Amino acid sequence: MPDDSTDDTLLLIDPDLDFLDWATKHLAANNLRILRCDNAANALKVVEKTPIGVVVAAMELDPFDGLELLGRILQQSPQTLVILTAGFPTTGQIIEATQRGAHDVLRKESLAFELRPVVESALQTQDERRSADRPAAELPKHDSRVKMIGISRALQEVFKLVGRVARSDAPVLISGESGTGKELVAKAIHEYSPRRQKEMITINCGAIPENLLESELFGHEKGSFTGAIARRAGRFEQADGGTLFLDEIGDMPLTIQVKLLRVLQDGSFSRVGANETITTDVRIIAATHKILADEVAAGRFREDLYYRLNVVEIPIPPLRERLEDVPLLAEFFLQRITKKNGMARIRLSAEAINTLQSHNWPGNVRELENTIARACALASSNILLPVDIPLASAPGKSPAVISAAIDQLINIAPAGQDLLAWVTREITGRVLERAGGDLKEASLVLNQPASDLRKLLARKH
């Protein structure tokens, strides 16, 4: 904790007195004053009387919840940094908390290893934050808005980015593998934005032939080409005041990219076959499974357009990097599929869940949904077992490839070492590296307790 200021004051707010005791001891530091409250009303009284640097508040409070408390605190003390905690914060809670100015949103089960560094960071930066950076206005609640399913830290970071960018009109580039849910993120940005009263129109740039894509985007005049029997408004006109989602932007032909660049620059375009200039007020969200920087280097994508689109990038992590989300997603798809088809309720066995979490998911969330749909169609009982899970083999993971990889490991193993232990340490270290050093995520990928992995990595021989 910072020790150069005697004015650092931390306010803990939670109805659980045992948690307050634990957090007080866990965060105790020299020159840090820690205050405690067990309800939102008393917390507001403390903020009225005492300058507070950082607040750690539960979402579930009486007589009003943490989101409302967040807004009230920031109205009274805009410089205060507020960290909210919840058992399983929903998509809406994370996005709205971020929009309202929350410094962070943490899951309670992760507080043992996340709370202290997050509070330390907040205490170090609180004097640098300005009230202008913190939107304090209350947002209306819209229960019908899109919901993204997941509790992983990686996906929660996506939710926070959505909350930060939704209010602006800045172009957003959503990147990620096919099937990760890029369109769902685009919908969330639109539905949490001031443009939500208008339409979000989606167009797949890779699914429309080049000779039709220009007309689809910008419209055409009667007689401008064969088959143009009447004037037609394009997607930019239809989306005026709303959002245009350009899916698979990496597949857009260079000739169309030039015209799109003009729209991004000054909001104007012309229909095919027309001289009239039309202006439009459209927020652009683009998505791609390609690495656009590589496409620029290869000359397949305009560099100037890339920088126009990539004002804010939201990378969507693949499902294999957030396996803790698999059980929730699988249950969500189970309920939706059985309800849609009028089927009796089907449950996943613990063994089936382990099978799902052991899969690499090259097709990501879309593959998981299709897998659950097939399992429901073929289920012989109301409980799905591993044998009922029709997992596809990952592309390129043939037995020959696996055999060659094992042979290579054996060939490069240091002489005189326990071969099995060495291979295990090397694989564990590589998985931990891919998880960004997050031992918990690595333990989920390897299906091993984090404590065992820590001991394994500590061994030198």
Image: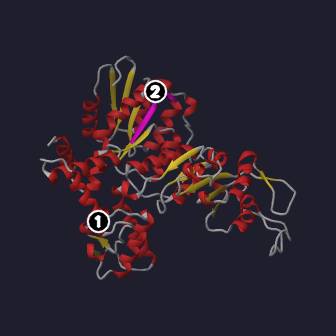
| In this picture, residue 57 sits left or right of residue 133 | left
Give the image location of residue 338, x and y in percent: 40, 76
* Residue 430 falls within the magenta-colored stretch: no
- Extent of the magenta region: 77-84
Give the image location of residue 129, x and y in percent: 51, 28
User: Which one is in front, 366 or 413?
Assistant: 413
- Kindly identify which numbered label has been placed on residue 199: none
Give the image location of residue 400, x and y in percent: 30, 68
Residue type marked 2: Gln
| In this picture, residue 428 sits left or right of residue 67 | left
Q: Say few, some or many: other residues with alpha carbon within 10 Å of mark 2 (under 14 / 14 to 19 / 20 or more).
A: some
Residue type marked 1: Ile
User: Which one is in front, 416 or 166?
Assistant: 416
- Kindly identify which numbered label has been placed on residue 353: 1
Element class at badge 1: helix
What residue is shown at x 65% (from left), y 50% (from top)?
Answer: 302
Residue depth check, mark 2 versus mark 1: number of the one nearer the observer: 1
Examine the rendering and report whether any part of residue 52 can be seen: no
Residue 371, located in which quarter of the rendered image? Answer: bottom left
Look at the image and tell me in which quarter the C terminus lies. top left
Q: Which residue is mark 2?
A: 126
Residue 362, located in which quarter of the rendered image? Answer: bottom left
Q: Is residue 324 above or below residue 382?
A: above
- CA–CA distance between discs 2 and 1? 42 Å
User: Which one is in front, 428 or 197?
Assistant: 428
Give the image location of residue 188, x and y in percent: 54, 55
Examine the rendering and report whether any part of residue 129 can be seen: yes
Look at the image and tell me in which quarter the N terminus lies. top left
Total numbered circles: 2
User: Which one is in front, 25 or 378?
Assistant: 378
| In this picture, residue 154 sits left or right of residue 197 | left
